[in-house]
Each structure stands twice: as structure tokens, then as C-alpha cells.
Image: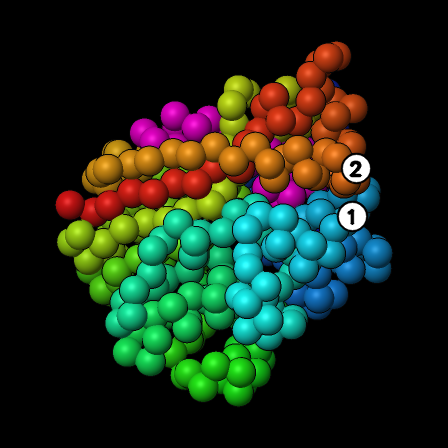
């Protein structure tokens, strides 16, 4: 099956009812899938841009920071980076969910939108040989890449506790009440049906299980020209929802003890490094404003009763 062509647009013509109607949830998922397939084949967000894999300059990640620089900037330790396969980190993070998950030996961890397996390989040693890590991704190229990293992970760690499954985060290929911790890194904002994702998180968690999510969220609504841009969507900006909407969705799914912690450093770093996507967004913002006035990285911690 061929994928629909990727459309990038930052003008008012993208906000017409006709243009919006053309982008059904399925269409958006296909565009996102193709964008991330290009990243998987190129090896990183910045490589996909340099090879022309992302139209119009910025998309899918920071072009001006290497994956290692980005990971270090958002809190991954040198030890964690050294222990993961080199090709697993493609610069797609906007936080460090394993740092807020307080993982313990023997736990079962599920990573939503696992990509090349980076956070799975960080989580694996934390849960140890008696634990298990499951990564789910909807992009076949990403699953192929992640599974290709397994042998390197086992060689480095001595562990065989990580696996990868093809599937959408709205319909997780995971049994009910089988997971201790759900993690995710800059992925939920991409879903066209976020309430369904939160319901799935609640479904797969064991009673007392917890979610530890790093994602992008809005401090206030984006201008329509940015919100309608597919390139910004793949870059994890246009698909984000308001901070309190994130809380409401998690609550509606039945989760409790919800803690939301904004982390503005990520957006400021992207702006300071003049990432092409954020330069493009700045051009569409009202005069006197900047991306960090609208968007923040957000740590979300919640528990299933």
C-alpha cells in the first residue's frame, strides 16, 4: 500500500474546512508513519533532513543537535548513553521517562512509540533479568531497526529482557493488567485519538501500576497556521494539547495521583540552537512571542488505582 504524500503548509490556506476535512485520523497516522520511516532509514532526525527525507527543512526532531547532545541536554547520563546501542538513539526525545518512572528490578515496562528502542534499552538494566521491557511502535521500519539493535544490547548488558511489537498505541498488542509501568517519550502528542491512548494505558496497567510520560504540551493554543502544519505535527508540536487537557484525559481514563511537571528547558534549547522547525514556527507566531510561550516539555506521572 502506498502512503499519501506528505503535505507541509504554514499558511491560512491550510486552515480551510476543505483542508482540515482531508486530514482524517487515518491520513495523519499514515503521514506520521512515513515521516518516522524516513527517520528510521536515515538513522536520525537530522540525517533524515540532510538527505531530504523531510520536506521544508525542520521536521521530526532537532537538526542542529546530535542525538547524543540532545539526550545529554534532557538528562540522560553518560552511563545510560554508553550502555545503549549507538543506532537506538535517533534524537527523538523531549524528556527522560525512565528517570521519572523509578523502575525497580522485576517490573514489566511498556514503551509506547519505542522507535529504535532507546528508552527500552535504558529501562532494561533497571528492571534486570527478572524484569521485562516491551516496546510498541506502529512503523515497521522502526521495529526492524529496534530488533536489529537487540543483539548489541544483549552483548553490552548480558540481558535478553527486551522485545518489540508492531502496533498502534491506540490499540496496544498487550494483555489487560499485565504491565507495571508504561513509559513514552514524545509520542502521545502524535496520536489523533489521545483519549483512546490513555484508556489503553489504563487497560494494560496492573492495579497500582503507573505511567511515566515525557511529552510536549501546550501552555496556550497555537496559532492556526502552526496547528494546521503537518510538518510541525510530525515534529511533535502541532499535535500537542493543553496541559490541563492532558490531566483531564488521564483522569477520564481512570488514572489517579496525576502529577504534571513542565520542563521548559527543551523548547528553549531548540529555539536557542535555531532548529529549522522552531525557526519556521517563530515566523508564524504573533509578534513579541516565542515557542516557549506556547509549548513546553511535560513530565506526566499517574497511577492506576
Q: Is residue 260 left or right of residue 32?
A: left
* 54 to 228, vertically: above or below: below
Q: Secondary structure at mark 1?
A: loop
Q: Secondary structure at mark 2?
A: loop
The image quarter in which residue 288 lies: top right
Please provide percent x and percent y for residue 227: 62, 28
Q: Which residue is mark 2?
A: 274
Q: Is residue 236 magenta?
A: yes
Which residue is rendered at x = 21% and y = 47% of the image?
A: 304
Q: Residue furthest top?
A: 287
Precedes in sequence: disc 1 or disc 2: 1
* 76 to 117, vertically: above or below: above
Report the disc number at residue 64. Answer: 1
Q: Which residues are magenta?
A: 228-248
Residue 18 or residue 51, whichever sits in front: 51
The image quarter in which residue 86 lies: bottom right
Which residue is rendered at x = 66% and y = 65% of the image?
A: 40
Q: Is residue 302 left or right of residue 11?
A: left
Q: Is residue 130 visible?
A: yes
User: If the image is split into quadrants, where does the N terminus sit?
Assistant: bottom right
* 80 to 11, vertically: above or below: below
Q: Is residue 37 visible?
A: no
Which residue is rendered at x = 64% and y = 43% of the image?
A: 235
> What whole-number distance in Å separates the C-alpha atoms at marks 1 and 2?
7 Å
Please provide percent x and percent y for residue 247: 34, 31
* 295 to 304, vertically: above or below: above
Q: Is residue 105 left or right of residue 17?
A: left
Q: Is residue 238 magenta?
A: yes
Amino acid at each position: 500500500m502506498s502512503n499519501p504524500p506528505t503535505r507541509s503548509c504554514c499558511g491560512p490556506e491550510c486552515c480551510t474546512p476543505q483542508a482540515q476535512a482531508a486530514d482524517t485520523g487515518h491520513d495523519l497516522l499514515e503521514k506520521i508513519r512515513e515521516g518516522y520511516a524516513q527517520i528510521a532509514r536515515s538513522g536520525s532526525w537530522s540525517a533524515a533532513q540532510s538527505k531530504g527525507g523531510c520536506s521544508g527543512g525542520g521536521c521530526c526532531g532537532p537538526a542542529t543537535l546530535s542525538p547524543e547532545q540532545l539526550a545529554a541536554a534532557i538528562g540522560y547520563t553518560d552511563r545510560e548513553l554508553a550502555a545503549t546501542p549507538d543506532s537506538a538513539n535517533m534524537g527523538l526525545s523531549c524528556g527522560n521517562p525512565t528517570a521519572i518512572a523509578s523502575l525497580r528490578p522485576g517490573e514489566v515496562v511498556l514503551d509506547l512509540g519505542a522507535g529504535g528502542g532507546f528508552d527500552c534499552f535504558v529501562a532494561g538494566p533497571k528492571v534486570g533479568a527478572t524484569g521485562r521491557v516491551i516496546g510498541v511502535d506502529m512503523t515497521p521500519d522502526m521495529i526492524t531497526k529496534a530488533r536489529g539493535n537487540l543483539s548489541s544490547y544483549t552483548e553490552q548488558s548480558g540481558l535478553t529482557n527486551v522485545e518489540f511489537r508492531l502496533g498502534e498505541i491506540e490499540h496496544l498488542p498487550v494483555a489487560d493488567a499485565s504491565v507495571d509501568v508504561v513509559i513514552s517519550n514524545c509520542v502521545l502528542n502524535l496520536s489523533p485519538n489521545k483519549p483512546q491512548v490513555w484508556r489503553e494505558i489504563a487497560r494494560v496497567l496492573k492495579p497500582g501500576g503507573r505511567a511515566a510520560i515525557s511529552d510536549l504540551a501546550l501552555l496556550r493554543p497555537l496559532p492556526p497556521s502552526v496547528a494546521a502544519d503537518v510538518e510541525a505535527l510530525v515534529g511533535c508540536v502541532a499535535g500537542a494539547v493543553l496541559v490541563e487537557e492532558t490531566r483531564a484525559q488521564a483522569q477520564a481514563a481512570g488514572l489517579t495521583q496525576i502529577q504534571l511537571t513542565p520542563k521548559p528547558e527543551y523548547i528553549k534549547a531548540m529555539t536557542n540552537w535555531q532548529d529549522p522547525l522552531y525557526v519556521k514556527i517563530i515566523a508564524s507566531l504573533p509578534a513579541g512571542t516565542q515557542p516557549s510561550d506556547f509549548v513546553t516539555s511535560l513530565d506526566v506521572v499517574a497511577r492506576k488505582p
